[in-house]
Image (cartoon, rainbow, N blue to C red):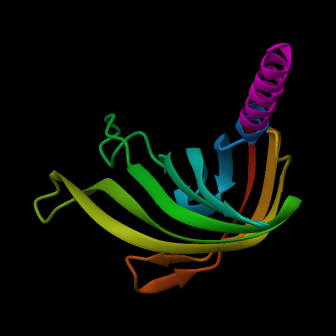
């Protein structure tokens, strides 16, 4: 009977070890972009939703503003919400490819010079380098990120990201 308990204990230990190793993979990232889809910068959250071999797939959302006041110098912030997906190839040092869209909400003067809130969508993509350890910790990204303003005019853009993976 004591062999049974040893085997049961050993099997439970293995299963908990497997769970803890799986949980040590960082799936969440909070980071700041300087440049990128948020134009001058944004605060972002990213979640890894799928991994296979050396490929990681994640989705991200952020928030940004480029102006706090409108044309009358009253507080009326311009809001930018970038969302998208990234595919990263590698381990610790990654090549990253991304596609996304950014919702932009801003105030401009209408024909009567009264403030009117407008909204638009901008497309974006990214190609760059990412450093992130599998267990988490410091994150760094450097990328080229062209922005397709209102899906009509292309602007060459880039960015740097610094963050923490957990």
Q: Is residue 65 above or below residue 157?
A: above
Q: Is residue 117 left or right of residue 34?
A: left
**Residue at figure coordinates x 45%, y 46% from the top left:** 67
**Residue at figure coordinates x 66%, y 69% from the top left:** 87
Q: Is residue 145 above or below residue 61?
A: below
**Residue at figure coordinates x 29%, y 43% from the top left:** 72
Q: How many marks?
A: 0
State which quadrant residue 131 falls in.
Answer: bottom right
Main SS of the magenta part reads helix
- Quadrant containing the C terminus in the rendered view: top right
Q: Residue furthest top?
A: 2
State which quadrant residue 121 falls in.
Answer: bottom left
Residue 4 drawn at (x, y percent): 79, 21
Residue 65 drawn at (x, y percent): 47, 46
Q: Is residue 151 above or below residue 63?
A: below
> What stretch of residues is rendered in magenta?
1-19
Between residue 165 and residue 126, name the one nearer to us. 165
Residue 22 drawn at (x, y percent): 73, 41
Q: Is residue 77 left or right of residue 156?
A: left
Q: Is residue 14 left or right of residue 110?
A: right
Q: Would residue 4 be counted in the magenta stretch?
A: yes
Q: Would residue 114 be counted in the magenta stretch?
A: no
Between residue 137 and residue 70, name the one nearer to us. 137
Q: Is residue 155 left or right of residue 97?
A: left
Between residue 68 and residue 16, name the one nearer to us. 16
Q: Residue furthest left?
A: 112
**Residue at figure coordinates x 24%, y 60% from the top left:** 118
- Quadrant containing the N terminus in the rendered view: top right
Residue 114 drawn at (x, y percent): 15, 52
């Amino acid at each position: 009977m004591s062999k049974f308990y040893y085997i049961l204990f050993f099997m439970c230990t293995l299963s908990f070890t497997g769970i803890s190793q799986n949980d040590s993979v960082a799936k969440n990232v909070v980071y700041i972009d300087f440049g990128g889809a948020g134009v001058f910068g944004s605060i972002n959250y990213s979640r890894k939703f799928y991994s296979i071999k050396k490929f990681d797939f994640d989705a991200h959302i952020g928030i940004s503003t480029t102006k706090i006041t409108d044309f009358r110098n009253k507080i009326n912030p311009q809001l930018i919400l970038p969302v998208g997906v990234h595919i990263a190839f590698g381990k610790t040092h990654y090549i990253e490819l991304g596609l996304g869209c950014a919702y932009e909400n801003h105030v401009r003067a209408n024909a009567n010079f009264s403030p009117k809130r407008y909204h638009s969508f901008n497309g974006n993509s990214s190609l760059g380098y990412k450093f992130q350890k599998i267990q988490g910790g410091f994150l760094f990204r450097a990328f080229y990120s062209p922005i397709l303003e209102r899906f009509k005019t292309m602007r060459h853009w880039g960015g740097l990201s610094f963050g923490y993976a957990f």
